[in-house]
Image (tube, grey):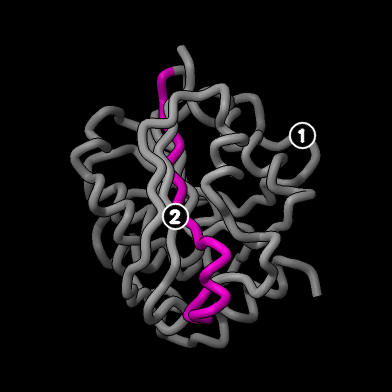
Amino acid sequence: MNQEALWSTRYRDAGEDYLFGTEPNRFLAHRHELLSNGSTALSVADGEGRNSVWLAEQGLEVTAIELSAVAVEKARRLALGRKMDVRFLQADMFAPGWPPAELHNAFDWVVGIFIQFVGPEWRERQFDVMKQLTRPGGRILLQGYTPKQLEYGTGGPSAVENLYTPEILQEAFADWEIEELVEYEEDIAEGKAHKGKSALIGLVARKPE
């Protein structure tokens, strides 16, 4: 089963519920004041829209990229219910030639929340795409799981190689200004899929001008 079919099945099986809930990721939400340093944002692998719709509620002009057609449809319903305008794009960020030229250097914020569905062989490509999307002086915000998450089993991938360590992120963003890199544990409640004590890591990195 390909990734689009896999994720569409998961989102469809959730029915009217939202797999990861409808509230924003806490690491993202706690940085709402920092988000005022910009007017445009892009949410990568946005899922059912909880983060993109919240970003729009902060007054940002928001684009959301998501592979699953089922997720995009649910995200549109969420945005409509909250009377928010989000540009939703169904797209594969790993497709050859993506992102299109009009999205290069286009966003003040590029947000990736729990996007650890790829291993090291694709991670560099994933981060490179996010870097291309970010304007000079703009920022990438990441939230992910660390390897200790495998002990908790409260969400995220089961493959340790998909998980982040501080060293992985420091190397990946060595040519950027890392404004925040924090590793911590916290109880989270994000729908049925992310629930319980979790081993987390968060990054905010600024692109050179």
Q: Which residue matches tag 2?
A: 201
Vertical placement of 194 versus 44: above or below? below
Spot occupied by residue 169 in the image (x, y as percentages of width and height): 56, 42
Range of magenta residues: 137-155
Q: Residue furthest top?
A: 209
Residue 6 lies left or right of residue 20; in this view the side is right
- Tag 2's secondary structure? strand
Q: Which residue matches tag 1?
A: 97
The residue at the point 61 percent across, 44 percent down is 168
Spot occupied by residue 182 in the image (x, y as percentages of width and height): 38, 48
**Front residue of 200 and 142:** 200
Residue 103 visible in image:
no
Residue 82 lies left or right of residue 47; in this view the side is left
Residue 104 falls inside the magenta stretch: no
Amino acid type assigned to the residue bearing label 2 in the image: Ile
The Cα–Cα distance between marks 1 and 2, rounded to whole angstroms, is: 30 Å
Residue 112 lies left or right of residue 122; in this view the side is left
Spot occupied by residue 100 in the image (x, y as percentages of width and height): 66, 31
Mark 1 neighbour class, 10 Å CA radius: few under 14, some 14 to 19, many 20 or more: few
Vertical placement of 205 versus 187: above or below? above
- Tag 1's secondary structure? loop
Spot occupied by residue 150 in the image (x, y as percentages of width and height): 57, 75
Give the number of the mark in front: 1 or 2: 2
